[in-house]
Image: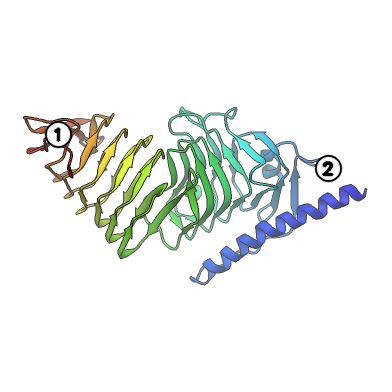
């Protein structure tokens, strides 16, 4: 009896620690003028040795009421979850409480799995290892627009490990979400945010393969200089400079989305799984004096116009396409892995569906690597 009582007390302590961390984050968010929800204290238990505990996390979620907490004891749970009500999903220990999607159901019509799908606002997920999403587009955590119509609001995803997923965390149309203290391992994308707006989101203290993941939202007039990183993302930024950064053996180097007038200079990006720099809906950016080696893509542009790419080194790059529905980008005096007598053709795609082959040209490619 006393052992059972001790375990219940321990659970309340763990839940209090997680909720206390979340409350602190929520209070920080509340300073920006956003109301904080107050959840009830009902707790549903998964795993462990309690006589009425659930064996599956999804069953507990299905039986929970909005505002409840689902507490999950240590163990490996082979499930793919759908969180469709506002609640707190708390793991006992992020290193030993594992949600594994390798045996989960595939999404209908899609050749990938999502380990945890969130379809409502005001959800907290904390204290888990989330791993093994199946497929090239497999996702560890996917936060959808509420009812597929509006924004994703006031979700808190903190203190988790996300492993072996193509997209570690994907959030659609976010407003006032917190993504913090997440460690990504073997994921092609870390926190990936789709579309605007992106108001009052808080993204900090995240790492990729134990290296810092820098993420800047709605910033302007600043410089990032001289760091070894796990990746850097710019969302809605303008007049920014990234220089003297290096990253290697990570999933992606630099992501620039919905930004304007960003300069990337003298950076080295090697051995990335997906690509060196991904530029999405961004214009009037400059890429100067960078080295890309053993990457799938060097720089890939999607719906991004009027950018300049010059005096870069592209060495042993795998993918043939460099742009999608992007126009008026200027390539000149780059080194393309070997001396070239003739101009370098840069292939891409244009058209409403991005299916019409097109090309740009570097008229004067360098005969040796820039800087030598």
Residue 243 visible? The answer is: yes
Residue 359 in the image: above or below residue 269: above
Image point (74%, 48%), residue name: 44
Residue 359: image tag: 1
Horizontal and vertical percent for residue 319?
Answer: 27, 30
Horizontal and vertical percent for residue 227?
Answer: 37, 53
Horizontal and vertical percent for residue 129?
Answer: 60, 42
Residue 203 in the image: above or below residue 118: below
Residue 228: image tag: none
Decide if residue 356 is on the left or right side of residue 113: left
Helix, strand or loop at label 2? It is: loop
Label 2, on which residue?
A: 50
Residue 86 in the image: above or below residue 51: below
* Quadrant of res 311: top left
Image point (32%, 42%), residue name: 269
Image point (54%, 55%), residue name: 155
User: Image quadrant for the C terminus?
Assistant: top left
Looking at the image, which is closer to me, 352 or 54?
Answer: 54
Cα separation between marks 1 and 2? 64 Å
Image point (67%, 42%), residue name: 62
Residue 194 visible? The answer is: no
Horizontal and vertical percent for residue 361?
Answer: 11, 36
Q: As drawn, which residue projects farthest toward the right?
A: 1
Which is more N-terminal, label 2 or label 1? 2
Looking at the image, which is closer to me, 359 or 106?
Answer: 359
Decide if residue 57 is on the left or right side of residue 33: right
Decide if residue 86 is on the left or right side of residue 335: right
Looking at the image, which is closer to me, 42 or 307?
Answer: 307
Coloring applied to the structure: rainbow
For disc 1, the neighbor class at 10 Å (few under 14, some 14 to 19, many from 20) is some
């Amino acid at each position: 009896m006393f052992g059972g009582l001790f375990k219940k007390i321990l659970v309340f302590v763990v839940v209090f620690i997680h909720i206390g961390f979340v409350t602190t984050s929520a209070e920080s968010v509340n300073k920006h003028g956003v109301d904080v929800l107050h959840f009830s204290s009902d707790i549903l238990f998964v795993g462990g040795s309690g006589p009425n505990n659930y064996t599956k996390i999804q069953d507990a979620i299905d039986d929970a009421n909005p505002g409840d907490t689902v507490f999950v004891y240590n163990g490996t749970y082979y499930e793919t979850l759908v969180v469709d009500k506002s609640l707190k999903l708390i793991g006992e220990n992020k290193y030993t409480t594992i949600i594994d999607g390798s045996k989960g159901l595939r999404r209908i019509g899609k050749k990938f799995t999502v380990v945890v799908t969130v379809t409502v606002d005001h959800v907290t997920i904390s204290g888990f290892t989330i791993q093994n999403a199946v497929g090239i587009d497999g996702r560890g955590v996917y936060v959808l627009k509420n009812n597929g119509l509006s924004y994703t609001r006031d979700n808190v995803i903190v203190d988790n490990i996300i492993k072996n997923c193509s997209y570690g965390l994907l959030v659609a149309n976010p407003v006032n979400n917190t993504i913090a203290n997440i460690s990504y391992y073997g994921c092609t994308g870390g926190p990936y945010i789709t579309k605007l707006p992106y108001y009052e989101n808080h993204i900090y203290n995240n790492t990729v393969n134990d290296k810092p993941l820098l993420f800047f939202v709605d910033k302007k007039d600043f410089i990032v200089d001289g760091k070894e990183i796990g990746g850097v993302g710019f969302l809605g930024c303008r007049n920014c400079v990234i220089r003297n950064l290096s990253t290697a053996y990570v999933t992606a180097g630099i992501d620039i989305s919905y930004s304007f007038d960003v300069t990337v200079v003298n950076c080295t990006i090697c051995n990335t799984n997906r690509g060196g720099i991904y530029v999405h809906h961004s214009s009037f950016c400059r890429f100067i004096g960078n080295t890309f080696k053993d990457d799938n893509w060097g720089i890939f542009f999607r719906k991004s116009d009027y950018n300049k790419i010059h005096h870069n080194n592209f060495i042993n790059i795998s993918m043939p396409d460099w742009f999608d529905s992007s126009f008026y980008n200027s390539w000149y005096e780059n080194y393309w892995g070997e001396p070239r007598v003739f101009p370098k053709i840069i292939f891409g795609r244009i058209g409403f569906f991005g299916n019409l082959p097109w090309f740009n040209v570097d008229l004067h490619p360098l005969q040796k690597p820039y800087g030598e």
